Amino acid sequence: MFGSLRIRNYRVWAGGALVSNIGTWMQRVAQDWLVLTVLTRHNAGAVGVVMALQFGPQLLLLPWSGYAADRLDRRKLLIATQAALGLLALGLGLVTVAGVVTLWQVYVFAFLLGCVSAFDAPVRQVFVNELVGDDHLANAVALNSTSFNAARMIGPAVAGLLIAAVGCGWVFLINAASFAGVLASLMLLRADQLHDGGRRARKPGGVAEGFRYVWRRPDLMAVLVMLFLIGTFGLNFPIFISTMSLTAFHGGAGQYGLLTSAFATGSVGGALYSAYRSQPGMAVLCAASAAFGMGCTLAAMAPDEGLFAAALVLTGLAALVFATGTNSLMQLTTEPAMRGRVMALRIAVAMGGTPIGAPIVGWIADRFGPRWALGVGAASGLAAMLVALRYMAGLRVRAVGAQA
């Protein structure tokens, strides 16, 4: 399960990333809580707008972000993006602590954060291959997800306590300081031990080549359709959890943080399960999509916060098996020279749908209640399952035709 940790560069990177990820999750919770309870009167639509601004650039900047991941030095690019993210967290923290923060300022910071993240996310994912090589890639991707979701489990719980004690602004400042960890880890990597063969073999051609490559691959197209469905309408848990905590269970910041941590607990379990599997497949993605839909359904029907938390554990587990499986499958089946562009397209599809889905889900939560919003998430999982079943049925038909 922990084979990639035997590699020194990966250990250094993973340690710095864990510190930074905890800070990032603290900021996400504090940002949503600031918008929902301080800058608006429990307006889920405003949280949806923040999410749209934060994830929309993943789609808008797709022509450049994937190309940069394939053409530029990935280590240097990561140093630049991580430093920029830290400065943005510092700026938001300063205006919040000073008591001058407004909703439009949060919108601006969310958009700028999204622009930097559009370049950071694809290069961070393909950089894992440089750290461990192809033989350990699936394991390293799963361990990355474990670290990310361990941070998701710790960060929100800590954030809930800090928000109640010192306010949202100090949470943002702590996150800014946490970027020192990942920057230090990048500086300490041994360049002579990086597996950079994929970068040396880069193909000429720009972003259009990435689109053409994916278009010729029915398996990648099916995965991207599934990612769009779940990413657009299902992965809106800042809205789901915050509105259920406030309006259904009448809780405060502490309960919101603990419920977010419950989702992350399931995510860690899903990531650890994925670390056992050397090769993900479409059948696993199909089962994970179905489990995600079932988890959202149970969460929507939960009568109290205890059962809601239990449903979130199941949903988080399914979401991470699905997300890790799509990541590993697309990297392992894509030739190294195209990985940056293909992974940028994956992220753009998974996150770029948020500007569409988050405002819709936020409006449904405001108009009809958060349980109906969770119903939309359930439908997205079941729809993704049908896409996988259709693809696998097509494979069987082609196999029968080939034998005939």
Image (cartoon, rainbow, N blue to C red):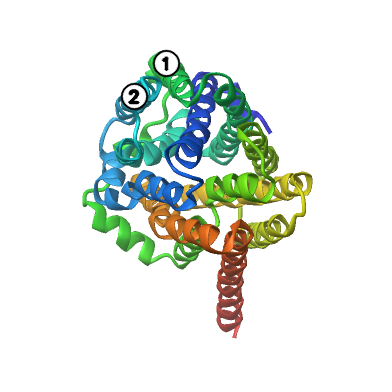
Q: Circle 2 sits in a helix, a strand or a loop, which is it? A: helix
- Count residues near mark 2 (Cα–Cα under 10 Å), then give few for <14, some for 14-19, many for 20+: some
Q: In this orientation, which residue lies closer to the viewer: 102 or 145? A: 102
Q: Residue 180's mark?
A: 1
Residue extending farthest left:
205
The relative height of residue 153 versus residue 266 in the rendered view (above or below) is above
* Residue 381 percent coordinates (x, y): 60, 62
The relative height of residue 385 versus residue 126 in the rendered view (above or below) is below
- Residue 68 makes an appearance in the image: yes
* Residue 38 percent coordinates (x, y): 46, 35
Q: Circle 1 sits in a helix, a strand or a loop, which is it? A: helix
Which part of the image, by quadrant, shows the C terminus? Answer: bottom right
Q: In this orientation, which residue lies closer to the viewer: 171 or 142? A: 171
* Residue 241 percent coordinates (x, y): 61, 46
- Residue 279 makes an appearance in the image: no
Residue pictured at 37% horizontal, 32% vertical:
196
Three-letter code, disc 1: Ala
Query: In the picture provided, is 55 more to the left or to the right than 284?
Result: left
Mark 1 or mark 2, which has the lower sequence index?
2
Residue 391 falls in which quadrant of the image?
bottom right
Three-letter code, disc 2: Val
Q: Residue 95's mark?
A: 2
- Count residues near mark 1 (Cα–Cα under 10 Å), then give few for <14, some for 14-19, many for 20+: some
Which part of the image, by quadrant, shows the N terminus? Answer: top right
